[in-house]
Image (tube, rainbow, N blue to C red):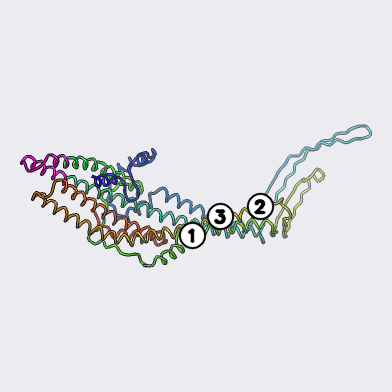
Amino acid sequence: MRCLQAFHGSGATGIGAAGVGAAGVGKTRTGVALAAALLLTPAWALDLRQAYEAAQENDASIRASRAGAAAAHEKLPQARALRLPNLSFNAGANRNSLKTTSETFFGPRTSSNAYNSNTQALVLRQPIYRPYLSAQEDQARAQVAGADATLENDEQSLVLRVSEAYFDALLARMQRDLIAAQKLAYATQLDAATKGFKAGSGMRTDIDEAQARVDMSLAQELEAAQNVEFTRQRLAVLVGKPFGELADLDIASFRPQPPTPASLAEWIAQAEAANPQLRSLQAQVDTAAKEIEKANAGHKPTLDAVAGWARSDSDTVTNVNTVYNQKYVGLQLSVPLFAGGYVSSTVRQAVADQERARESLEAARRDLGVKVYEQYRAMTEGILRVGALAQAVRSAEQALQSSRKSFTAGARTTVDVLNAEQQRTLAARDLAQARYLYLLSRIRLQALAGNDRWANVDQANASLIAP
């Protein structure tokens, strides 16, 4: 009974921890509406590559990531624009009213004047020496590189999300089929126990034990069916459309292979060089370094080339109806002297931000090494686990056949046969789960190392067989 309870308790738990519970059911109204819309769309067969292609087009998270990367790319042309010539035109027209009061020998005297005035100015400015703008352009390049790395990291995360949802759905379907087969075997054993009891060769406890197993399998079957629907719906939301059959693992040709290269140190070195999350954090360090340069530029002078034309008409009350035309070309130098300590404070702030980014990068690098080790070991040990469980399935099958023959001969009880049936089911479930975990570990290891995600998907998809 302990093994049965263990199997029953794991029925709603998939590879990606996709359990059915209040958190799974309590989705937002938007998710419910999307689910309803998906059910009204014609279904289609699906393999892992097709699922990833559909998620690329329909997943809202990855579309948001692409939009964010596109927005970040605009920082570079904006920074470059500040170093190019700037041309501006200003114009103004005023109606002036001047009232003047003056003291005279005869007392205060007031006079009023009203006149129009207008001005126009065209100014061309070309920055020659502005350290702030140079640092800002370099910072924009780092920000664009960081945005590209972040997008790549999100793309790799989508591969993992789709793969986990896909294999969860396969595992849930397999568990449902195993439980259905187990229920049929229990029903057969119940029928045999009933006939034996009526013939006088069996005991009532055999019937009760078999009936209890049948009843338990019915409850497990309902739970497994619910888990199948949940995992399929989770995958359907990712791909943005409903689907029919899923391509399952080609067991006949499935041969788990060790990681290539075989050295863990090489995988860690490759991950440190190409992992998109590390590249994104490195870009943040570079961005923070350029922020220090921008802050230090507050202490430095700036030099611009300036050319302009200005026209003014009736500029003052003493120049009514007088027009001035002015043209000028020259250099404009600005030297900062004292800003109350503001510039020094921004420098200290930028240095602290750079230190924070550098330490975050180091923490992520160390964590990446642990993750690579974990997935590398999961692959290498997964090969051994798949082999051991395949042997366990064969042994459990042989034990079941022997128990059935011994039961027919009267040397075994119904409980022995039921336990052997349950042990075979558990071994088959564990073997399937080990195969899927091996495939997921390989996908995760490739993603951590920053390898091509399409090649990663195709490699896993090659292990599947068309429905």
Helix, strand or loop for disc 3: helix
- Does any portion of residue 247 appear in the rendered image? no
Give the x, y percent position of residue 347: 64, 55
List the residue tagged with mark 3.
Answer: 356
Q: Nearer the viewer, residue 199 or 161?
A: 199
Quarter of the rendering containing residue 87: bottom right
Which residue shows up at 81% across the image and 36% down it? 99
Which residue shows up at 44% across the image and 56% down it? 153
Q: CA distance from mark 2 to mark 3?
A: 17 Å
List the residue tagged with mark 2.
Answer: 345
Residue type indicated by callout 2? Ser
Q: Which residues make up the magenta segment?
A: 185-209
N-term-proximal mark, 1 vs 3: 1
Question: How many residues crowd mark 1 within 10 Å: few (<14), some (14–19), many (20+)?
Answer: many
Q: Which residue sits furthest top?
A: 107
Question: How many residues crowd mark 2 within 10 Å: few (<14), some (14–19), many (20+)?
Answer: few
Q: Quadrant of the N terminus?
A: top left
Give the x, y percent position of residue 187: 15, 43
Task: Assess whether mark 3 and mark 1 are in contact (beta carbons under 8 angstroms).
Answer: no
Drawn side of residue 186 relative to residue 240, left or right: left
List the residue tagged with mark 1.
Answer: 279
N-term-proximal mark, 2 vs 3: 2
Q: Which residue sits furthest right?
A: 105
Looking at the rendered image, the disc whose residue lies closer to the viewer, 2 or 3, is 3
Looking at the rendered image, the disc whose residue lies closer to the viewer, 1 or 3, is 3
Which secondary structure is most common in the magenta stretch? helix
